[in-house]
């Protein structure tokens, strides 16, 4: 595989990062995941804007992104992925700093890394829905930054996988925030409900696209707190993300809900989302 590393496209085998890179020592970095659908980069401008916000929040210098799209195009082409959907992973860490110190010096040069990977759509999950679990959200208070410090996400997702669940949905004091790698929304009486944007959730780009689709199709949108005690009220639930797309949720482990199978609003949103990706 060919990857982008600090200004050059090069063979995966030739990339080495120092153990003194602050990304390795402190998880001191940010990332983005962008979807390529032949032949477009989905919501590229929104991803670039969020990447800049994350970098600014961590005071990591924003690299020159003028030729970013050309780099992505070249990576897709040279990895023979022009005709298939692909996930693009972008990571920028604060960079190499020796000796190890918690505080960072202003002259550290960021490490910039991009990979592309063929993406096979999880048709079964999109069609039939998934089971999820609920856990307390123990993350920090800046979950709006797409930081590579993902230990709570890793551990929750690992527990989910061990139990045969697709995702863990977190709550803070009973109020739902988001999943380990997705946002969440619910449907009640043909209206959509989703937790409001705040420092406790990532401003998901799929979430934004879905809310716009709702407005276009006259589905009322409620960005409001959702308590885990009220889950029984909902007719449908979906997890949303660049990789997850719009995946119906058919069960919350250990909780009695009325979610049984993917509902009509989910189907409408999936159909319209697909059009945005491919048409
Ligand atoms: N995850 N919330 C969290 C915690 C996420 O990690 C993600 C995305 C989302 C959805 O955001 P978007 O719609 O912009 O992809 C919400 C990426 C895909 C990942 O970590 O792989």
Image (cartoon, helix red, strand yellow):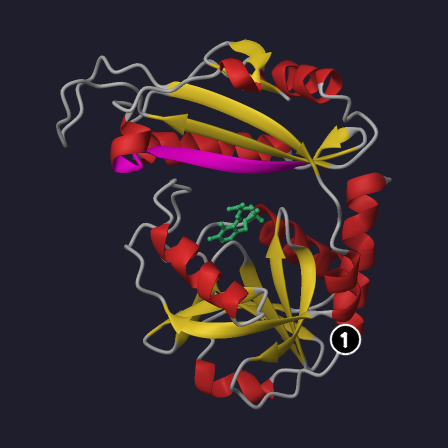
Percent from the top left, x then y, of residue 237? 64, 73
Instruction: Give the total number of marks visible in the rendering.
Output: 1
In the image shown, does 102 or 61 lie closer to the viewer? 102
Q: Image point 46% across, 74% down: which residue?
A: 134
Residue 187 versus residue 107 in the image, above or below: below
Q: Is residue 113 above or below residue 46?
A: above
Stretch of the chain drawn in magenta: 26-35
Residue 258 vs residue 11, the one in the foreground: 11
- Quadrant where the image shows the N terminus: top right
Q: Quadrant of residue 249?
A: bottom right
Would you say residue 50 is visible in this rendering? Answer: no
Q: Up-down: is 172 above or below 150?
A: below
Residue 30 painted magenta: yes
Taking 134 as reference, is 94 left or right?
A: left
Asked if the residue at label 1 sits under 8 Å from ligand 1, the reply is: no
How many C-alpha atoms fall within 10 Å of the one at disc 1: few (<14), some, or many (≥20)?
A: some
Residue extending farthest to the front is 13
Q: Main secondary structure of the magenta part?
A: strand
Where is residue 212 drawn, in percent x and y?
Answer: 67, 53
- Position in image of residue 58 (x %, y %): 29, 33
Q: Quadrant of the C terminus?
A: top right
Q: What residue sits 38% from the left and 48% below the top? A: 150
Q: Which residue, given by chain and number where applicable, does mark 1 sit on?
A: 263
Q: Tell me if I can see residue 167 in this picture.
A: yes
Look at the image and say whether residue 278 sits in the magenta stretch.
Answer: no
Quarter location, residue 185: bottom right
- Furthest residue to the top? 8
């Amino acid at each position: 595989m060919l990857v982008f590393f600090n200004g050059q496209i090069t063979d995966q085998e030739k990339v080495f990062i120092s153990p003194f890179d602050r990304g390795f020592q402190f998880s001191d970095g940010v990332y983005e995941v962008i979807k390529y659908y032949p032949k477009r980069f989905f919501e590229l401008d929104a991803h670039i804007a969020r990447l800049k916000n994350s970098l600014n929040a961590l005071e990591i210098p924003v690299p020159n992104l003028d030729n970013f799209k050309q780099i992505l195009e070249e990576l897709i082409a040279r990895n023979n992925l022009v005709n298939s959907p692909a996930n693009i992973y972008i990571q920028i860490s604060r960079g190499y700093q020796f000796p190890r110190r918690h505080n960072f010096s202003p002259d550290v040069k960021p490490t910039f890394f991009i990979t592309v990977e063929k993406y096979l759509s999880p048709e079964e999950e999109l069609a039939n829905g998934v089971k999820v679990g609920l856990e307390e959200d123990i993350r920090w208070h800046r979950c709006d930054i797409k930081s590579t410090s993902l230990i709570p996400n890793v551990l929750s997702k690992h527990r989910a996988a061990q139990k045969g669940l697709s995702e863990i949905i977190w709550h803070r004091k009973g109020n739902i925030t988001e999943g380990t790698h997705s946002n969440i929304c619910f449907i009640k009486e043909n209206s959509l409900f989703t937790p409001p944007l705040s420092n406790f959730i990532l401003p998901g780009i799929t979430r934004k696209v879905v809310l716009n689709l709702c407005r276009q199709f006259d589905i009322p949108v409620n960005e409001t707190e959702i308590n885990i005690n009220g889950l029984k009220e909902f007719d449908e639930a979906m997890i949303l993300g660049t990789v997850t797309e719009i995946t119906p949720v058919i069960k919350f482990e250990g909780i009695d809900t009325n979610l049984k199978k993917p509902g009509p609003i989910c189907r409408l949103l999936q159909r319209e989302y697909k059009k945005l990706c491919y048409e």
